[in-house]
Image (cartoon, rainbow, N blue to C red):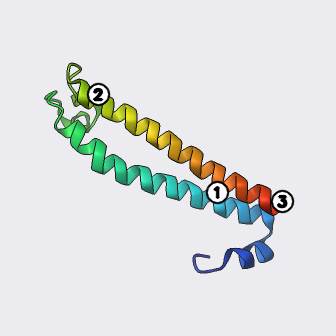
Amino acid sequence: VHKTPWSTLRHLAGLDAYFYLRYIRMCLKITAVSSFWALVILGPVYATGGGNQSGFYYFSMANVMQDDTGRVWVPTFFCWAFTMYCCFCVRAEMVHYIELRM
């Protein structure tokens, strides 16, 4: 399935299976991109937050001191960028769906 061209897959499996596989691919892209950037950006921000937490809380918002406003805004911007990326991915798939159905 990985090396099969999309046109061949659409012809052999049908339109429902084709869009289901594209949906799974879109979810994989969103998960991979968000996981990478979360580890690169949010991991160090949470780990060096100075809240003296232990265990899993060491890598969470609980470890960030509330008076350190710079570190508090980083997750907000990350969430905003992640939401925009998800909207971009969904819109690209919707455009492809509309082009194929029209």
Q: Residue furthest top?
A: 67
The residue wearing badge 2 is: 72
Tell which of 29 and 14 is nearer to you: 29
Question: Image point 52% across, 58% down: which residue?
Answer: 28
Q: Position of residue 70 (x, y in %)?
A: 24, 29
The residue wearing badge 1 is: 23
**Precedes in sequence: disc 1 or disc 2:** 1
Q: Split into 4 quadrants, where in the image is the C terminus?
A: bottom right
The residue wearing badge 3 is: 101
Mark 1 in CB contact with mark 2 (< 8 angstroms):
no
The label shown at residue 53 is none
Question: Image point 80% across, 63% down: which residue?
Answer: 100
For label 2, the crowd category at 10 Å Cα-Cα, with few meaning under 14, some 14 to 19 and many 20 or more, is: some
Mark 1 in CB contact with mark 3 (< 8 angstroms):
no
Question: Image point 65% across, 49% down: which residue?
Answer: 91
Question: Under tag 1, what secondary structure?
Answer: helix
Q: Quadrant of residue 45?
A: top left
**In the image, 54: left or right of 26?**
left
